[in-house]
Structures are given as structure tokens and as C-alpha cells.
Amino acid sequence: MNQAPVAVFDSGVGGLTVVNALRRELPDENILYLGDTARVPYGGKTQRTIERYSEEISRMLVGEGAKMIVVACNTASALALPHLREILSVDVEGVIAPGVRAALATTRSGHIAIMGTKATIGSGAYERALCEARSDIQVTSVPCPLLVPLIEEGLLEDEVTDMVLSRYLAPLRESGADTLVLGCTHYPLLARAISRCVGEKLTLVDSAANCAHAVAETLNRNGLRASSSQSGKLRLGFTDPPDRFLEVAGRVLGLDTTGAELRHVPPLD
Amino acid sequence: MNQAPVAVFDSGVGGLTVVNALRRELPDENILYLGDTARVPYGGKTQRTIERYSEEISRMLVGEGAKMIVVACNTASALALPHLREILSVDVEGVIAPGVRAALATTRSGHIAIMGTKATIGSGAYERALCEARSDIQVTSVPCPLLVPLIEEGLLEDEVTDMVLSRYLAPLRESGADTLVLGCTHYPLLARAISRCVGEKLTLVDSAANCAHAVAETLNRNGLRASSSQSGKLRLGFTDPPDRFLEVAGRVLGLDTTGAELRHVPPLD
């Protein structure tokens, strides 16, 4: 039994979709969330920069007693996970492997589409993981660079968003893919608009629930689960003061975001 | 005579529009440019964060011998200029005051519209400066949060950009405003699309040329002009490795961007 927090980080508010899944799967665990809104978005930046930001944040969270790090950001999972696993003393779970497992469990045609930021798609992390798991799988990757800015603007139901989605995703309708991985933790907030765009031929898969399962398994395996004598606390921190959209996201996800704090991430030496 | 560089910074590539104007106005000056692409965009972030980023960059540039700092970013000019002037030993010029002078010289109706990022518009910096200069002036402010992401995506001529512009700007056509200030150094890259959207009723004004005049005046006043025996050099640095869009921007602006370097901005103590 271990009351130390599970720490979760993302470039912004998108990782709250993972927090939501963790709260359902592990209601007794204390959760410490860090959204790097002062440097959001990560999706257009390079591996070097994303590794540095991820390391700074993870070292801070481990320094505050985190018993495990959850990288609730596909861009950082795609580009910084090996680096974090090399340098950190605690377990690190990302969102790519759980998303891959969910996609493989869903597809019947064996053709899976992935949508993500430019950095996530450019990393090839999903293709590699899917093909390692099943060599006969066909993958179509779709970089969607404008979605995070549109979501951070709160345009969840909007004709501009629909037009951008249509440009990115309409070609998938006739592609033969039957499964669409929401390869960015922001995208579940657009699930309705995405479903409207791709129609019923594709099943949407997000990694949040599968990521929460993976975290539970890791904690169980290491004997690190919290005692169930009290319900877990959620502590939210952001590197730029939270704005109106945090409320919107909180409402969509059913999370109380009123106590969110401003945090400073110490740079590496 | 002083061969020390004039240092120019922006959150990304937008400030190159100011570099372009400086090269025309002051061809003998060495210019040192820093684009903070690892933390772009600034426009949705808060004053506290923008002041910190601006201070870190300015201290680095002054440490490298800059004889003057040009804040070629409207968001940082709107929110961090007083702070920078307080802490730095060299002159600091921003883009707001030059844009205001250009707008006042252009308007006949006395009604000026400003487009900018959420942070720039929210700061009220343009309204204050315009009303201080001429109390009878009428100002309409239009926050345009999606334009920097669209421009950084290279969608300079695109129906999505046109739709977003139309939403932001179409109401201006019948407003009585006759002058439209491009209150973000990225926006001159969209000048054609913006003109198409607002029609001929509004004259577009950008601060780049006026900012370059102001820099020349300051250097002259302080006896800091470079000798004209050789043409000035341009050194470009970015905090995230430069990508394809830097080339696009360079081509649009006629700047050679091939020697751009990756730079690290030291954090404050």
C-alpha cells in the first residue's frame, strides 16, 4: 500500500481525458497532474525539445514523490518515452502501447488508421508498434496539425473544425480502414465531430481507458496500490495560469478543475 | 559607429517581417534574430509567462553584445515592454507604438480596427496608445486566435484560412473603420487573404516599416549606428530546430534563411 501519487503529464489539458479514466479505474489513487500550458502545443516541435520538456517535468514530479509517471500526451509518448525510461527510477507508462492494444482488439479488416499531431505521426511510433504486434496489419497515418489549436480554442462543435476534419479524414471513408485511433489525448473532446465526419465505417479508439488498465497492472505488479481506506485526491497544476477552456474541458469530462494551481517547472542544469 | 548587433526577437518566424524592414532601412547594421519556436505561440499565454520568456531572451541577447533590443512580437510588446525597459540597460523598441503612429497617419474616418492574438487584444495596449494619442479616436478590436497556427501551418492561401478570416473580419466591412492594423507580426504573411476578406474599405497597416524607422532614430540619437563600410550581417537563431515553414516565410520575405541555428535560451535564476 502506497499513498504516493500517480503523476500524469501532458502539454496542456488533453491529458485530463487520461486522468478521467484513471479516476474510474483507480478511485483510491492520489493523482498529481501537470499540464505544460506555458509551452503548449508540443505537436509541432522536434524530438530534442520534447525530450527536454518531458525530462524537466518528470524529474519535478518524481522529486515530489510520484510513484509512477504517466505520459498522457501522445507526442511525448511517441518521442520521449525511451529517454524517460532510461533516466527515471520509477515506472513510466505512455499512451501509444495502450492505444495500439485497443486498436488491435477492435479491427476486423486489419486496416487501422491513426490520427495525431505532426510530431506523433512523423515519429512512426504507432506504425512500428502495430507492425511489431501483427506483421499483416495495414496502417494509414493522418497528421492533423490544426486540431489541437482548434480544441484549445474550444471549437468542439464548429463548422471550421468540421471543415478541417473533413479535409484530414474524409479520404479514410473509402480506405478500407475500420478502426480510427485518436492518437492525441485532446481528440476525445472532438469524438462527436470526428464520428460525424467518418461515418459509421470506422470505430473510434482512444487510449485513455487502456492506459488506465496498464497503470493499474503496473501498480499491482509492483505492490504500489494505494489503500482503499479513503478516496484518492486529484491535484491539478498548469505552467501557465488556467483559462476558460480548462473549465470547458472539466465540464465535458466531469472533473472538478476549480483548485488548479500555477506551477513552475525547473529547467535541467 | 558601433558594429554591435541590433537584436530582434519574436515567439516564432513572424518577427522576420520586421527583420525585412530593418534590412531595408538599416542595410549596414548587423542583426541578431531569435525566434522562440520551442515555446510558440505566445498569443494564448498570460502576462506573467510572456514577461518571463521575454526577459530570458533579452538577457541572453544583451549578454551577447546587442546594442538594442527590438521586440518584433506584438504579444510581447503589449505585455512585456514596461518590464523589459525597467530591467535592461539598452534601448528597447516594440511594435505597438510604431503601429499606432502608422494607423493614425492613415485613418481619415477616425475609426481604427486592430486584429491581434488573444493576449495582445486582451491587454488593451493598442486602445490605450491610440486614445492617449488622440482622444476622439474610435477603436474596434478583433482577437484572432487561430491565425498564428494557420500561418505556422503555411495555409496562407487556403479556404479554411479564408473562412476563419471571414468570421473574424467580415463584421468590420460595415463598421465604419477605414484602417486595419495587423497587430501581430505574423499577419503580413496573410495580407493578400486579409485584403480579399475586408475589401477596399479598409487600408491595412503593419508596424514593420514604422518600427524600423523608430529603431533608426534611436540608434542615431544615441550615436550607435554601424559604419557603412560593409553591409550588415543577419544571424538567425531558433529555439526549436527550424522547419519547412521557415523556408516558406523566407521566400515570401526575400530573406536567406539557410544558415539558421538552433539556440538555447538560459532560464532566469
Image: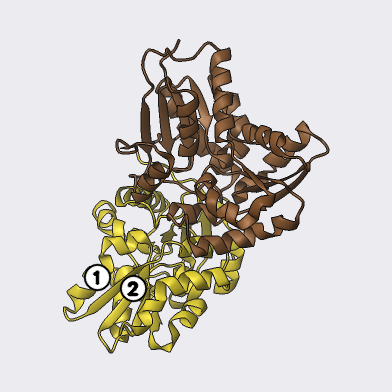
Chain colours: A brown, B yellow
Residue B209 visible within the image: no
Q: Name the residue under label 1.
A: B127
Residue at figure coordinates x 60%, y 67% from the top left: B248
| Kind of residue at disc 2 | Ile
Residue at figure coordinates x 43%, y 59% from the top left: B10
**What is the residue that sits farthest to the left in this orientation?**
B135
Q: How far is disc 1 from disc 2 in space, using C-alphas?
A: 9 Å
Q: State whether residue B91 is above or below residue A58.
A: below
Q: Name the residue under label 2.
A: B114
Describe residue B82's horizontal placement relative to residue B234 as left or right.
Answer: left
Is mark 1 in CB contact (under 8 Å) with mark 2?
yes
Q: State whether residue A212 is above or below residue B67.
A: above
Q: State whether residue B38 is above or below residue B104.
A: above
Q: Which of B196 and B66 is in front in this view?
A: B196
Neighbour tally class for label 1: few under 14, some 14-19, many 20 plus, Cα within 10 Å = many
| Kind of residue at disc 1 | Glu
Residue B162 in picture, x, y percent from top left: 52, 73
Q: Which image quarter is the N terminus of chain A in?
A: top left
